[in-house]
Image (tube, helix red, strand yellow):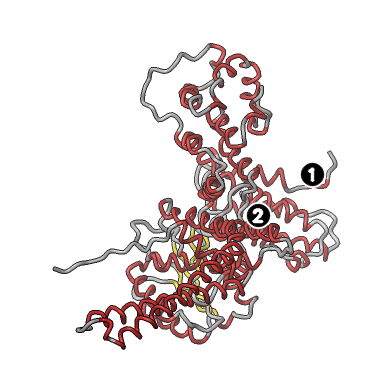
């Protein structure tokens, strides 16, 4: 009968802690890690010698035919085994004492390893949100090691450990959020924060489950809501019935809510109740997460904003890094692809070409849009680029999913020792049905290219595209003011998309090229005004070119065009320099 043994190679929390602890100690105390490895080898050798002596002795006893006292060779073997066993046992006991001492020194760095392991399992489940979010332990370990190397040095061990923990959290957050969509970034930040709190036993599981699910009971028989609480929604009242059973902190919540209904109603009616002091003793009685539960049952429309405040209170991260090609290049390596996951209408190829020229790779930059019968050409330029150190851009990978299996094999086979300057850039739209090879996803540095969310992030992104050289191209004193105006205008147009039909009747693909060309138009006309000594700026011309031609050229709905031009008429004109 044949037997098959199935081994589970999935990493465990404890196993990953030990693995990451080895990395931390190897960096912080390399002599300690070397001593530990030496001790492991010595212990293994001693156990091996002991096993050989035992086998020799048993073999001698089994082959002996006469009385044992007459077998001089066997007696000598017994004596040798006894003395060697005693010596080995002493060595093993000494090794145990040394191991205890070494582990005591190593374990002071366990909090850093625990943070790293917790964060890995926090990102491990992201693939259930989107199948493009695949991460390998190898890539994660590289990020972890780079973070402990970049953490601020400190002669006090506890401060150094705290700095490493903070840097690991920051690096992992930046690494992950650069490769996930805007709609998932706050979710990940919350998940990351709560995972760390659970690891430190600072979060109640029952309260956390309630926050996620609310009252899941299908029973309709709930206590009657008092008239003074008529402002509490039906769902909120139902959730409160579960909330009051979660512990001593909530046992009198209904009574307090009823008795102080005027104060609670005043809190409820506030525009931003999550920032206000809770009535009665609840402000000092509840921790920051429990205050989230109050917002959840009374003002669920403010939960997202309350979550952001909670994350900040727990020293988490809510501001994802602004996308920069320089940062991506710094994080990348010649052995791993850089995968751009695109949203509709996004195309980083133009900016990448500019960046390649700036870095001196203009002649070594090769871009190829993939499609039918392009596989052989793609493989050819990839083979040449690996050897010559080219930057290879393979676009639209989602159109050749069947060939990506071959690409996965090429990456595994030929990208182990490529030219140090080599980079492989890939672009794709998100795929479904797990059709994109997991091997490429896990190995790649993922970068999501889409408009940022919110005015602040939009404007930060726009300003990242502008350097001092660009600002110096125009000598007119009003240019910098108008750069801010166009940045704000662009951010407003982008941010209206999140309101659906209330924002725009039709979804428009306003992108970076609209902003860039608008700046070029501003620079050209303002330089012309300087050359002609004109005091008055050509506002009507600028509003027409930017509003009607540039941005307005994408707008097909008359009411949307009216909204766009209303913004521009308000933002761009002589009123900019008129005192109120």
Residue 71 sits in which quadrant?
Answer: bottom left
Mark 2 nearby-residue class (10 Å; few <14, some 14–19, many ≥20):
many
Mark 1 nearby-residue class (10 Å; few <14, some 14–19, many ≥20):
few
Decide which of tag 1 and tag 2 comes sooner along the chain.
2
Residue 575, labelled with which disc? 1
Decide if residue 42 is on the left or right side of residue 306: left
Residue 129 spot, x, y in % from top left: 43, 51
**Element type at mark 2:** helix
Number of numbered discs overlaid on the protein picture: 2
Identity of the residue drawn at 52% across and 12% down: 226
- Cβ–Cβ below 8 Å for labels 1 and 2? no
Determine whether 106 is above or below 218 in the image: below
Identity of the residue drawn at 13% across and 68% down: 1
**Between 353 and 506, the one nearer to me in the picture:** 353
**Element type at mark 1:** helix
Q: Spatial distance from mark 1 to mark 2, Cα to Cα?
A: 18 Å
On the question of residue 450 being in view, the answer is yes
On the question of residue 558 being in view, the answer is no
Residue 255 spot, x, y in % from top left: 56, 16
Residue 500 spot, x, y in % from top left: 51, 41
Decide if residue 36 is on the left or right side of residue 396: right
Decide if residue 3 is on the left or right side of residue 405: left
Identity of the residue drawn at 59% across and 46% down: 495
Residue that carries the numbered disc 2 in the rendered image: 546
Quadrant in which the C terminus appears: top right
Q: Point out the residue furthest to the bottom here.
A: 73
């Amino acid at each position: 009968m044949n037997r098959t043994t199935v081994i589970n190679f999935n990493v465990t929390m404890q196993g990953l802690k030990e693995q990451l602890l080895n990395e931390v100690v190897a960096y912080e105390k390399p002599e300690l890690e070397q001593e530990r490895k030496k001790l492991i080898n010595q212990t293994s050798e001693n156990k091996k010698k002991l096993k050989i002596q035992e086998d020799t002795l048993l073999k001698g006893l089994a082959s002996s035919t006469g009385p044992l006292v007459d077998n001089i060779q066997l007696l000598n073997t017994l004596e040798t085994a006894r003395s060697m066993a005693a010596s080995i046992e002493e060595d093993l006991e000494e090794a145990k004492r040394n191991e205890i001492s070494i582990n005591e020194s190593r374990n002071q760095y366990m909090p850093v390893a625990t943070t790293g392991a917790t964060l890995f399992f926090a990102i491990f489940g992201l693939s259930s949100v989107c199948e493009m979010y695949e991460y390998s332990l190898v890539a994660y370990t590289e990020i972890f090691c780079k973070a402990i190397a970049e953490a601020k040095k400190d002669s006090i061990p506890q401060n150094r450990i705290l700095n490493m923990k903070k840097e690991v959290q920051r690096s992992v957050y930046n690494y992950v959020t650069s490769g996930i969509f805007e709609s998932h970034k706050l979710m990940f930040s919350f998940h990351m924060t709560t995972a760390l709190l659970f690891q430190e036993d600072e979060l109640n599981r029952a309260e956390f489950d309630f926050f996620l699910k609310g009252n899941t009971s299908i029973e309709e028989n709930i206590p009657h809501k008092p008239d003074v609480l008529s402002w509490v929604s039906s769902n909120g009242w139902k959730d409160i019935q579960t909330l009051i059973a979660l512990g001593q902190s909530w046992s009198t919540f209904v009574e307090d809510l009823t008795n102080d209904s005027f104060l609670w109603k005043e809190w409820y009616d506030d525009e931003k109740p999550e920032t206000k002091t809770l009535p009665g003793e609840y402000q000092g009685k509840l921790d920051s997460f429990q205050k989230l539960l109050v917002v959840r049952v009374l003002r669920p429309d403010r939960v997202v904003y309350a979550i952001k405040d909670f994350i900040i209170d727990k020293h988490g991260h809510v501001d994802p890094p602004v996308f920069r090609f320089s940062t991506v290049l710094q994080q990348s390596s010649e052995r791993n692809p850089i995968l751009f996951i695109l949203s509709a209408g996004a195309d980083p190829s133009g900016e990448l070409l500019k960046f390649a020229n700036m870095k001196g790779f203009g002649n070594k930059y090769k871009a190829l849009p993939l499609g039918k019968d392009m596989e052989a050409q793609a493989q050819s330029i990839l083979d040449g680029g690996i050897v010559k150190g080219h930057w290879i851009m393979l676009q639209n990978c989602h159109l050749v999913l069947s060939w990506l299996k071959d690409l996965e094999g090429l990456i595994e086979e030929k990208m182990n020792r490529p030219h140090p300057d080599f980079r492989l850039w890939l672009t794709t739209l998100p795929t479904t049905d797990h059709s994109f090879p997991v091997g490429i996803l896990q190995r790649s540095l993922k970068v999501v290219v889409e408009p940022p969310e919110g005015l602040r992030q939009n404007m930060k992104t726009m300003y990242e595209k502008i350097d001092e050289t660009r600002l110096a191209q125009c000598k007119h004193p009003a240019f910098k003011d108008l750069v801010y105006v166009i940045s704000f205008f662009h951010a407003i147009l982008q941010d209206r998309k999140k309101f659906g039909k209330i924002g725009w009747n039709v979804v428009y693909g306003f992108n970076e090229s609209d902003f860039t060309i608008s700046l070029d138009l501003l620079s050209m006309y303002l330089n012309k005004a300087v050359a002609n000594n004109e005091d008055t700026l050509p506002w009507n011309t600028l509003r027409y070119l930017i509003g009607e031609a540039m941005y307005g050229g994408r707008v097909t709905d008359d009411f949307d065009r009216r909204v766009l031009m209303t913004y521009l008429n308000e933002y761009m004109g002589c009123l900019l320099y008129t005192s109120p």
